[in-house]
């Protein structure tokens, strides 16, 4: 898989992709993440990528030309399955969307800034608009990191234990059950006996019940 991220703050993304699972996923060849500085695609001598909003009002708007130039340059080299715009008014990200996107080959993610992008970018280029929650961030970069992380960890081979993404919260519309590790007792608080029993089928059953119970209490909407 290849993910191209278009941003006017490329440095903001560097450290996120340079560590841990996301770094290993790239080094292992499971994913190629390429960050593009939108300012490299402007014809403006001051490398500006934004301008005042027509009609007035506070806040700058990201211009269509640099974005169009960047997207078209990428499209000249390969076909993209989705061109995603990170925006608080997009469809809310969930595990189902992450699963579906993890099956794609080439993705572009556009990060918005200021008051957002010229509406014609959305009309002419964007195939999917995604929000990571009902709150406004100062830019789409963090949201692009969240989306990329949710996708990349699902790619087969990226996680050491192949099954561990499958047992995540939300994969079956249930929250994950509680987990424990050593010591078996901490200041009088013991790990549930069943987990020490070695009885695999009963442990699976216990975990499923716990997942159901936790979901019922915390996120009953997932069971509807
Ligand atoms: N950009 C600003 N806020 C955002 C959000 N909540 N989700 C996605 N992109 C955003």
Image (cartoon, rainbow, N blue to C red):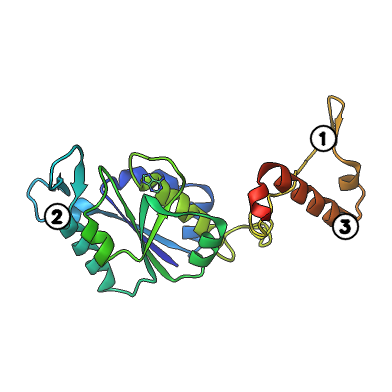
Tag 1–tag 2 contact (CB < 8 Å) = no
Counting residues from the N terminus, which is met first, the one under dot 3 or under dot 1?
1
Circle 2 SS class: loop
At 46% from the left and 48% from the top, the residue drawn is 132
Q: Quadrant of residue 52?
A: top left
> Is 187 placed left or right of 105 in the picture?
right
Q: Which mark is residue 64?
A: none
Residue 224 in percent (x, y) is at 66, 56
At 45% from the left and 67% from the top, the residue drawn is 1
Query: Mark 2 highlights which residue?
Result: 42
Query: Mark 3 highlights which residue?
Result: 200
Work out which residue is located at the far left of the displayed protein and give it: 45
Q: Residues within 10 Å of mark 2 (few under 14, many from 20)?
A: many
Counting residues from the N terminus, which is met first, the one under dot 1 or under dot 2?
2
Up-down: is 224 above or below 88?
below
Do we see residue 17 in this rendering? Answer: no
Q: Nearer the viewer, residue 19 or 200?
A: 200
Do we see residue 90 in this rendering? Answer: yes
């Amino acid at each position: 898989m290849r993910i191209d991220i278009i941003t006017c703050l490329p440095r903001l993304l560097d450290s996120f992709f340079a560590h841990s699972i996301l770094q290993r996923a790239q080094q292992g060849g499971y994913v190629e993440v390429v960050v593009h500085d939108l300012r490299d695609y402007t014809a403006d001598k001051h490398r500006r990528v934004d301008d005042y909003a027509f009609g007035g009002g506070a806040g700058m708007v990201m211009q269509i030309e640099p974005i169009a130039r960047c997207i078209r340059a990428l499209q000249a080299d390969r076909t993209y399955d989705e061109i995603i715009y990170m925006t608080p008014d997009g469809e809310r990200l969930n595990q189902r969307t992450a699963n579906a996107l993890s099956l794609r080959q080439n993705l572009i993610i556009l990060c918005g800034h200021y008051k957002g992008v010229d509406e014609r970018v959305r009309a002419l280029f964007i195939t999917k608009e995604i929000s990571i929650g009902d709150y406004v961030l100062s830019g789409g970069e963090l949201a692009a990191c969240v989306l990329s992380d949710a996708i990349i960890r699902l790619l087969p081979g990226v996680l050491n234990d192949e099954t561990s993404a499958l047992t995540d919260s939300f994969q079956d519309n249930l929250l994950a059950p509680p987990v424990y590790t050593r010591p078996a007792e901490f200041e009088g608080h013991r790990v549930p006996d069943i987990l020490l029993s070695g009885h695999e089928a009963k442990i699976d059953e216990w975990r499923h019940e716990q997942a159901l119970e936790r979901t019922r209490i915390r996120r009953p909407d997932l069971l509807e």
